[in-house]
Image: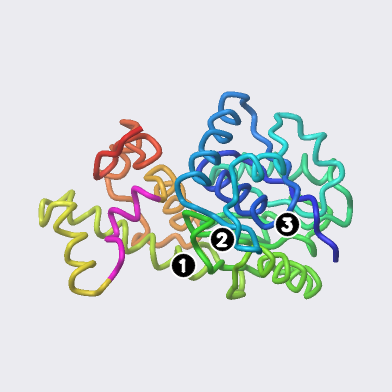
Amino acid sequence: MNIEIVGVIGAGVMGVGVAQNLAQSGFQVVLVDVSTSILEHARQEITNNVRFQGFFTKDKNPLSPEQVLERILFTTDYQALKTVDYVVENVIEKWPVKQEVYTLLDAICPPTAIFAANTSAISITRIGSATQRADKVIGMHFMNPVPMKSMVEVIRGFHTSEETIEASRSFLQRMGKSCVVVNDSPGFVSNRVLMLTVNEAIFLVHEQVAKAEEVDRIFKNCFGHKMGPLETADLIGLDTILYSLDVLYESFNDSKFRPCPLLKKMVDAGLHGRKSGRGFYDYPI
């Protein structure tokens, strides 16, 4: 399958990273969001990322923001997806929102287009059920920041075909990434483990067993982790952590996935981590 034009749905933190990585890899990108202000912020984020992180072409020449941006169409019009070969969806982790997006995508995109759900916890089989192309729906769990991470967790839904898996594997290789393919289960491998770890770390702060920085120091200095669980939570977004835990709790009906009250309180207060400027730590905006 020849993939040249890729739709990216959602211009939040993950969508920006995916769009940037795709453009740097030579794909034409259609980045769609509901708000022009969000798209303008995405444009500025990509400009800053390319300028300050220092990316290069295959010929080892410095890659300029202009070279990346010229490959990206920023738009609020879903009709711009009529000619895409592949779609990476990055909308909020709420099933009613996902369902509406996939119904719309299914009606607009070419019947040959593959849909990749960049989701943290929602079942890929369930997402496929919102389309008439369940064999072409796959999970593609990118890690943040996308351009800097070389591994992707790929999830096979019940109906996902081998052709879709192989096309997606080649697609990721062109982005400079390898993958591990796992079977469909809420949270998959990474977030089924990670969300429990993060939630338990938040409980430790909630119960005043330790401060956030003390929890993170233990994981970094004792276990050699690059980031502690609460730094990781801030990077992912505390709202995303909460939504993912809600999905896991609903899916398994297991109390071990119940979100910590402190997490709920912080999300209600708008303390979403890096993207809001404040979570367990403070960040410049």
Q: Dot 2: within a 10 Å radius of its alpha carbon, few (fewer than 14), some, or many (20 or more) residues?
A: many
Label 2, label 3: how many angstroms apart (C-alpha)?
A: 16 Å
Q: Nearer the viewer, mark 2 or mark 3?
A: 2
Report x, y in % for residue 5.
Answer: 79, 50
Q: Which stretch appears magenta?
A: 225-235
Report x, y in % for residue 130.
Answer: 74, 50
35 or 283: nearer the viewer: 283
Secondary element under disc 3, as helix, strand or loop, is: helix
Secondary element under disc 2, as helix, strand or loop, is: strand
Where, by quadrant of the figure, is residue 179 drawn? bottom right
Looking at the image, residue 224 lies above or below residue 137: below
Q: Is residue 229 magenta?
A: yes
Q: Amino acid at mark 1?
A: Ser
- In the picture provided, is 268 more to the left or to the right than 108? left
Q: Are marks 1 and 2 in contact (CB under 8 Å)?
A: yes
50 or 268: nearer the viewer: 50
Instruction: Identify the mark at residue 214; answer none if there is no mark.
Output: none
Q: Which residue is mark 3?
A: 128
Q: Residue at x 74, y 53 (%)?
A: 27
Q: Which residue is mark 2?
A: 141
Q: Residue at x 67, y 50 (%)?
A: 23
Q: Say which quadrant the N terminus sits in.
A: bottom right
Q: Which residue is mark 1?
A: 190
Q: Residue at x 81, y 72 (%)?
A: 163
Secondary element under disc 1, as helix, strand or loop, is: helix
Label 3, label 1: how many angstroms apart (C-alpha)?
A: 21 Å
